[in-house]
Image (cartoon, helix red, strand yellow):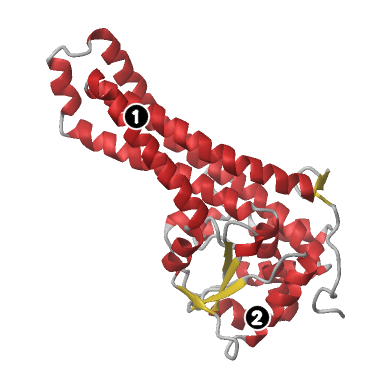
Amino acid sequence: MRTSPPAGSRLPDAITDPVTGRKISLLDWKAANLRSSWLLGLLMVVLLGGLGWLIGYAFDPGLATIVLVIAVVVGVGQTLAAYFASDSMVLNVAGARPANEKEHRYLVNVSEAVAIGAGVPAPRVYVIDNPAPNAFATGRDPQHGTIAVTTGLLQLLDRQELEGVVAHEMAHIRNYDIRFMSMLAATVGAIVLLRDVAMRAMYYGGMGRRRSGGGGGRGQIVVIILLLVLLILAPILALALRMAVSRRREYLADATGAYITRNPEGLARALEKLRDYKGAPMKVSDGVAHMFFTNPNVRLNAVGLFATHPPLQDRISRLRRM
């Protein structure tokens, strides 16, 4: 039985969406991710600018423009950081180190073979010294792709299963999921940051002092109410959107990974082993947990508004129906 994609193999132009059962063009999926990434960056700048203006106006109408400019600068900075530095930040947070070609030759060989099948440059390969089996991909495009796997994953899986996991992560790289998810995470993070700043300022009574001074009148009160509603709802809605998008992309990456290896059973068996793993869970920041092959918090591999990944058994069943 073949254990790696043949050299020169070509990924199909379309795959079957495991959720809807319809054919999805991989080129259209990739193009949509590229468009969505830049739109998210623009949306983040506009949204932060709007929230900044509201915050400034709520404290003092004369400060609205100044705070708007500061918020836009923060938004642009967050967008650039998400684009250029998200991979370095995620690798540092996860405690990943570059794979040693002598020590991890097996992993490097698998990654190179799967990259050929996916039609992308071989990614940089990192290892996380952790007994819990898991992996993730990061990087802004296929030319800067990175895959990190835990030592626990290397010990637990056989070659076909490891190829399935690597192919799943390679699908995220090939189709620009990683850039899109980095931009989406940055958007949520920026909104939460601005909310925390505003809430802290309100806690110390800044708005109350301005209102008691009669600075903005009825218009200022309306803005304060609108701001409070947005500060409560915006992070929740943005987080729910991020999780819903993440779940769908996990299904699609499973399907694409199965096509890359021509072996959905290998990926299904890998998911079964991770499902049945009983060791200590991997502890990672909530900000990067959604990027992993399975969420280190087992409860978030589920059906629910804030689940980042679909249920493992559901992913297994869909793969076995391919």
Disc 1 marks a residue whose amino acid type is: Leu
Residues packed near mark 1 inside 10 Å, few (<14), some (14 to 19) or many (20 plus): many
Q: Position of residue 88 (x, y in %)?
A: 47, 64
Q: Position of residue 172 (x, y in %)?
A: 66, 58
Relative placement, left or right, of 172 versus 73 is: right
Q: Which residue is mark 1?
A: 68
Residue 9 against residue 15 in the figure, above or below:
below
Relative placement, left or right, of 16 versus 280 is: right
Badge 2 marks a residue whose secondary structure is: helix
Residue at x-position 72% and y-position 52%: 252
Residue 25 in view, yes or no: yes
- Residue most extreme to the bottom: 102
Comparing 276 with 14, the one in front is: 14
Q: Position of residue 119 (x, y in %)?
A: 77, 65
Looking at marks 1 and 2 on the same chain, the residue that comes earlier in the sequence is marked by: 1
Tag count: 2
Q: Quarter of the image holding residue 321?
A: bottom right
The nearer-to-camera label among 1 and 2 is 1
Q: Position of residue 204 (x, y in %)?
A: 15, 34
- Are the residues flagged by discs 1 and 2 in contact, CB closer than 8 Å? no
Structural distance between the alpha carbons of marks 1 and 2: 48 Å
Residues packed near mark 2 inside 10 Å, few (<14), some (14 to 19) or many (20 plus): many
Comparing 115 with 22, the one in front is: 115
Disc 2 marks a residue whose amino acid type is: Val
Residue 100 against residue 130 in the figure, above or below:
below
Q: Which residue is mark 2?
A: 108
Badge 1 marks a residue whose secondary structure is: helix
Assign the N terminus to one quadrant of the image. bottom right
Q: Quarter of the image holding residue 52?
A: top left
Residue at x-position 58% and y-position 52%: 179
Assign the C terminus to one quadrant of the image. bottom right
Relative placement, left or right, of 156 versus 224 is: right
